[in-house]
């Protein structure tokens, strides 16, 4: 996607805006697929970017899909995924979510607690249908190195390995549950191929042991993922050759024990992050006590990840001034949005070329956990538009929000006569 395309999109659709590069999405999907053993299936994690158009693209590319809420489940169906392509993972599934998953006969509900399993059995009984489930395990092993570690520690995700005997004993005795598989998700944002390989080997070994110990055929094994992308200075791209070779070796070692098992990996960030740009217009440039502030029309309410939400280390997303030749002289600036809070900083002490009001700041690597991860109601600014650029065409995936959106579902107090009279 070149500079002219971005200029054209910004002129036509205004800012703030998310622009996704369709070719890049396709490239990332094919890259990931090419380094997995042939038998492995990729499940796109909708949480990374839940746009219908994005999900449609993954469907077209041959992906399966992993959902984590009722709306994500409906997104999967609207994007054209068939039930056998859908798995549902979330520690807090509601009855409505479970009932819909069961009614629509999705491939696997990944169960995160014994209580959830008992509830699914109860719903299955009510509906007179056996429900296929996979059990998510919180394994004892904990391979450090993930950006966000999710196993080997106390967690709301999955059932502790030490509780498996009791949990699987009960699950196997419940007539409306069909235990088809196991799921382990050890963490996110791993950049060392060796770590992912080791992780997946440990998961495979554990899954084989568990299925043999508790004597059930492993129809499905969800290996999780954690495929990362480098955001910050000093981070390296995942070595895809090393990953491919390592996973192939692991697979060849254990494939004979997993004949007939469907093997899945999940990915959101790796597939989407690199494809997205967040473009915001500079409204004002000002200086305060020696710090230069670049005040933009988009901020942490639209791109919380760039504003360090959920991260301990305050490093900046890569960003630049749009359409600028390489500059000899860079200035340190702080890029902020328009919220009335000092935390509304999407770039702290960033080195940028000359920047004036009317310029555009482009935040790179913004395709995953962008708008979806942001507190969009804070200060009631309209939602940015989201567009996809693919094969020379711009497709609007989400129209710019309107002020009216903020009133949807709200009721004026004056409609509650009685309450008003009492106050
Ligand atoms: C169970 C599960 N699957 C998939 C993902 C997606 O992770 P990523 O976007 O890093 O690939 C997550 C992220 O937290 C997750 O918890």
Image (cartoon, helix red, strand yellow):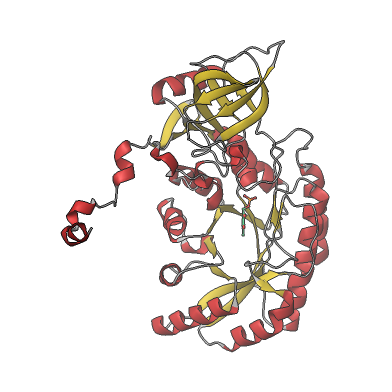
User: Residue 1: in sight, yes or no?
Assistant: no
Tell me the residue at 82%/45% (across/down).
242
> Could you tell me residue 418's position as x and y percent?
17, 62
**Residue at the outermost front position:** 423
> Could you tell me residue 187's position as x and y percent?
70, 56
Answer above or below: position of 314 versus 138.
Answer: above
Observer-nearest of 238 and 368: 368
How many numbered discs? 0
Observer-nearest of 217 and 5: 5
User: Residue 243: in sight, yes or no?
Assistant: yes
Q: Assign the N terminus to one quadrant of the image.
A: top right
Answer above or below: position of 321 versus 339.
Answer: above
Tell me the residue at 62%/23% (across/down).
320
Q: Assign the C terminus to one quadrant of the image.
A: bottom left
Tell me the residue at 76%/45% (across/down).
191
Observer-nearest of 58 and 162: 162
Find residue 136 and report its image quarter: bottom right
Find residue 402 and report its image quarter: top left
Find residue 347 and report its image quarter: top right
Observer-nearest of 17 and 314: 314
> Could you tell me residue 414's position as x and y percent?
19, 52
> Could you tell me residue 421's position as x and y percent?
17, 59
Ligand 1 found in image quarter: bottom right
């Amino acid at each position: 996607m070149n500079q002219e395309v971005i200029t054209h999109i910004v002129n036509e659709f205004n800012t703030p805006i998310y622009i996704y590069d369709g070719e890049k999405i396709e490239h990332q999907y094919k890259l990931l697929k090419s380094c997995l053993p042939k038998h492995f299936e990729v499940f796109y994690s909708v949480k990374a970017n839940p746009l219908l158009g994005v999900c449609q693209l993954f469907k077209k590319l041959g992906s399966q899909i992993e959902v984590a809420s009722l709306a994500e489940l409906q997104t999967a169906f609207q994007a054209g995924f068939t039930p056998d392509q859908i798995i549902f993972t979330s520690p807090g599934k509601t009855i409505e979510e479970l009932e819909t998953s069961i009614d629509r006969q999705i491939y696997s509900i990944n169960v995160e607690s014994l209580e959830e399993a008992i509830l699914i059995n109860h719903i299955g009984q009510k509906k007179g249908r056996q429900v296929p489930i996979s059990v998510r395990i919180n394994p004892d092993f904990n391979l450090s190195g993930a950006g966000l570690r999710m196993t080997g520690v106390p967690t709301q995700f999955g059932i502790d390995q030490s509780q498996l005997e009791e949990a699987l004993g009960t699950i196997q005795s419940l007539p409306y549950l069909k235990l088809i598989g196991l799921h382990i998700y050890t963490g996110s944002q791993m950049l060392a191929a060796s770590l992912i390989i080791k992780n997946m080997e440990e998961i495979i070994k554990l899954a084989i042991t568990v299925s043999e110990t508790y004597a059930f055929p492993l129809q499905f094994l969800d290996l999780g993922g954690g495929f990362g992308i480098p955001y910050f200075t000093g981070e390296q791209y995942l070595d895809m050759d090393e990953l491919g070779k390592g996973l192939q070796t692991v697979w060849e070692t254990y494939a004979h024990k997993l004949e007939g098992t469907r093997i899945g990996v999940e990915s959101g960030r790796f597939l989407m992050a690199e494809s997205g740009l967040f473009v915001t217009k500079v409204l004002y440039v000002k200086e305060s006590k020696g710090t230069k502030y670049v005040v933009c029309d988009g901020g942490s309410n639209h791109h919380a990840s760039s504003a360090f939400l959920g991260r301990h280390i305050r490093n900046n997303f890569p960003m630049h001034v749009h359409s600028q030749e390489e500059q000899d002289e860079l200035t340190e600036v702080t890029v902020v949005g328009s919220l009335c809070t000092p935390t509304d900083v999407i770039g702290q002490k960033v080195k940028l070329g000359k920047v004036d009001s009317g310029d555009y700041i482009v935040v790179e690597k913004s395709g995953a956990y962008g708008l979806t991860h942001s507190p969009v109601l804070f200060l009631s600014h309209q939602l940015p538009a989201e567009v996809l650029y693919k094969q020379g065409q711009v497709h609007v995936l989400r129209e710019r929000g309107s002020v009216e959106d903020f009133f949807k579902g709200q009721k004026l107090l004056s409609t509650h006569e009685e309450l008003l009279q009492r106050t």
